[in-house]
Amino acid sequence: MMEPVAGDSTAAPEGAPTTVPRKTTAPKTTAAGKPPRRTRRTRMTGKERREQLVQVGRAIFADRGFEGTSVEEIAAKAGVSKPVVYEHFGGKEGLYAVVVDREMRQLLEMVTGALTAGHPRELLEQAAFALLDYIEQDSDGFRILVRDSPVAQSHGSFASLISDIATQVEDILGLEFKTRGFDAKLAPLYAQALVGMVALTGQWWLDARKPKKAEVAAHLVNLAWNGLDGLEPKPRLIGHRKS
């Protein structure tokens, strides 16, 4: 028979099963001694989710183009499943159409809203600055607009946008032609030529970014206003915009 350990009043009798006390871990606490709060994930509303998908899709379309973008990538970047994208837009084409429509409206508003001056030369400056401002501030949007559309259509494309802007310019040129005794029926032709020149130069400047914006605008107006025969060696801007 084993002798109990001296001073051990809790020694178990011989033959009794022994148990090892279970270690307990104290709950985690913050520095203030309080248990940490669980962060609840905020659920987006349908409107917020749609806007998130538009922004995610816009960035990917600008980087990869329509063909290089997949619904899987859009969903993964947004942290949702593919069915969520289909639920909001019906697929990649629907999302792309929303993105393009937004960019077209923004650019059209910027250009037409800039045409406020009375002098025709300053109007040219304003139109050139408006497009270059858009390219500088919203390069992703412009890249999307100038890429090939997934469906060949007469509307919803960069070409149709340029045509819309040219229509605005056409009215201005028509009045100027009448004042100068020119054939006003030719105003649409000149409007398309002027706007097309600015738009194509803008596509080139999108990546070149040289010379500076004001210098690009000055040279565009120089060619449009003076023609090749009367080009100014150092064109200047006459409007209030200098940069």
Image (cartoon, rainbow, N blue to C red):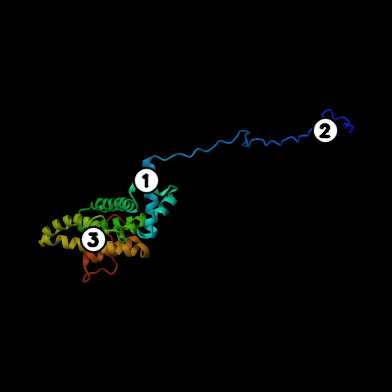
Mark 1: which amino acid? Glu
Q: Rounded to the nearest whole Å, what is the CA distance between mark 2 and mark 1?
A: 73 Å
Q: Rounded to the nearest whole Å, what is the CA distance between mark 2 and mark 3?
A: 102 Å
Q: Rounded to the nearest whole Å, what is the CA distance between mark 1 and mark 3?
A: 32 Å
- Crowd tier of the residue under label 2, counting other residues whose Cα lies within 10 Å: few below 14, some 14–19, many 20 or above: few
**Left or right: where does residue 221 sit relative to residue 67?**
left
Do callouts 2 and 3 mark residues in contact (Cβ within 8 Å)? no
Q: Nearer the viewer, residue 105 or 47?
A: 47
In the structure shown, which secondary structural element does the residue marked by tag 1 occupy? helix
Do callouts 1 and 3 mark residues in contact (Cβ within 8 Å)? no
Residue under the point 40% across and 49% down:
82
Q: Nearer the viewer, residue 193 or 152?
A: 152
Residue at which label 3 appears: 195
Q: Nearer the viewer, residue 78 or 136?
A: 78
Label placed on residue 15: 2
In the structure shown, which secondary structural element does the residue marked by tag 3 occupy? helix
Residue at which label 1 appears: 51
235 versus 3 height, above or below: below
Q: Mark 1 or mark 3, which is nearer to you?
A: 1
Mark 2: which amino acid? Gly
Q: Mark 2 or mark 1, which is nearer to you?
A: 2
Location of the N terminus (image quadrant): top right
- Crowd tier of the residue under label 3, counting other residues whose Cα lies within 10 Å: few below 14, some 14–19, many 20 or above: many
Residue under the point 14% across and 57% down:
174
215 versus 34 height, above or below: below
- Could you say where residue 239 lies in the image, as x and y percent from the top left? 27, 56
Mark 3: which amino acid? Val
Given the current orientation, which residue lies at the most extreme bottom position?
229
Does label 2 or label 3 sit earlier along the sequence? Answer: 2
- Could you say where residue 163 lies in the image, as x and y percent from the top left? 21, 58
- Could you say where residue 171 lies in the image, as x and y percent from the top left? 16, 55
